[in-house]
Amino acid sequence: MTGPYDDIINLPHPEPKTHPRMSISARAAQFAPFAALTPYNDEVKEATRITHEKPELDETIKYILNERLLLLKKNLNNKPQVNITFFVPDMKKAGGAYVISTGFVKKIKEYERLIVMSDETLIPIDAIINIQGKIF
């Protein structure tokens, strides 16, 4: 069987004389997809990120939290280890996230309404949802 390209089909591939041949990885990079819509993809990820609403605590829970804070303040010298659940508002959209900080309470700054944990985490007292620990 003869074809129109029989005269060139078995010839060796020509090598360039003036510059080296491009590597396979460099050649592949030329054909990589162009990501013109990267900001759009970031916006889609941000829009689909789930946040939670800040809970409204009823008076009973506020009373219990206040009692636990007073107990924490009394036992501060004993370095009570606690789990404090608090709400952190999201900086980009409505809502936020629940965060649990576990460790020893270093101090309570009443004027600033902050709890300072042993790892220097600052917890706003008004954002606290739950306090659990060995002293309760």
Image (cartoon, rainbow, N blue to C red):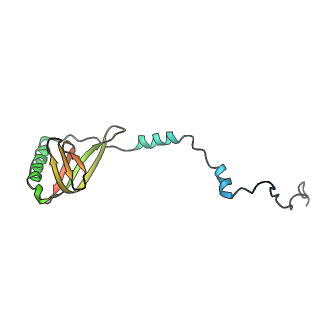
Q: What residue is rendered at 71% in x and 55% in y?
A: 22
Q: Decide if residue 90 is on the left or right side of residue 44.
A: left
Q: Decide if residue 91 is on the left or right side of residue 19.
A: left
Depth order, front residue of 91/56: 91
Q: What residue is rendered at 31% in x and 43% in y?
A: 96
What is the quadrant of residue 80 in the picture? bottom left
Q: Is residue 136 visible?
A: no
Q: Position of residue 94 (x, y in %)?
A: 33, 37
Q: Position of residue 111 (x, y in %)?
A: 14, 41
On the rendered image, what quadrant is the N terminus found in? Answer: bottom right
Q: Is residue 91 above or below residue 20?
A: above
Q: Position of residue 39 (x, y in %)?
A: 50, 40
On the rendered image, what quadrant is the C terminus found in? Answer: bottom left
Q: What residue is rendered at 26% in x and 41% in y?
A: 54
What is the quadrant of residue 92 in the picture? top left
Depth order, front residue of 67/18: 18
Q: Decide if residue 94 is on the left or right side of residue 42.
A: left
Q: Decide if residue 33 is on the left or right side of residue 55.
A: right
Depth order, front residue of 7/74: 74
What is the quadrant of residue 28 in the picture? bottom right
Q: Is residue 15 visible?
A: yes
Total residue callouts: 0
Q: Position of residue 73 (x, y in %)?
A: 10, 51
Q: What residue is rendered at 68% in x and 58% in y?
A: 24
